[in-house]
Image (cartoon, rainbow, N blue to C red):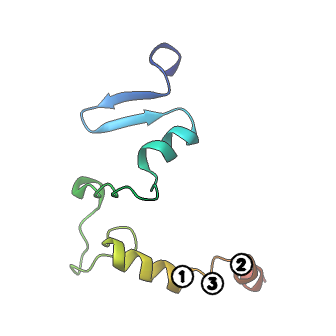
Amino acid sequence: MHSKYGDVVRIGPNDLSYVNEAVVRDVLGHRQGHEEFAKSPMSIPPSPNGVHGLLGSNRADHARFRRNFSHAFSEKGLREQEP
């Protein structure tokens, strides 16, 4: 389908297929000075306890979660977990 229709192909009413990562960054990425796209409630599964985690949280909470988790996923943090 991509060879016929291009880098972005609609494969369903709410689904797009991307052929390369540059297109994904252009469509879904954050750009300085531009408003962020809201997350679709359809793409976020409901939380069993009503509290959203990292992926389903609002922008402020998401930034807070990322700061808290950043050390664990840094180069040094991953090396410390290796054994």
Secondary structure at badge 1 equals helix
- The amino acid type, in three-letter code, at marker 2 is Leu
Given contact means CB atoms under 8 Å apart, are the residues at marks 2 and 3 in contact? no
Q: Earlier in the sequence, mark 2 or mark 3?
A: 3
Tell me the crowding category of disc 3: few under 14, some 14 to 19, or many 20 or more residues within 10 angstroms, Cα based: few
For this view, does 16 lie left or right of residue 23? left
Residue, disc 1: 69
Where in the figure is residue 26, as x and y percent of width and height?
48, 43
Where in the figure is residue 14, as x and y percent of width and height?
26, 39
For this view, does 79 lie left or right of residue 5? right
Given contact means CB atoms under 8 Å apart, are the residues at marks 1 and 3 in contact? yes
Q: Which quadrant would the C terminus be assigned to in this image?
A: bottom right
Marks 2/3: CA–CA distance: 9 Å
Q: Residue at x 28, y 57 (%)?
A: 38
- The amino acid type, in three-letter code, at marker 1 is Phe
Please name which of the two marks, 1 or 2, marks the residue nearer to the observer: 1
- The amino acid type, in three-letter code, at marker 3 is His
Residue, disc 2: 78
Secondary structure at badge 2 equals helix
Image height check: is 56 above or below 49?
Answer: above
Residue, disc 3: 71
Where in the figure is residue 56, as x and y percent of width and height?
32, 68
Q: Residue at x 35, y 78 (%)?
A: 60
Q: Residue at x 46, y 52 (%)?
A: 29
For this view, does 55 lie left or right of residue 83? left
Tell me the crowding category of disc 1: few under 14, some 14 to 19, or many 20 or more residues within 10 angstroms, Cα based: few
Marks 1/2: CA–CA distance: 12 Å
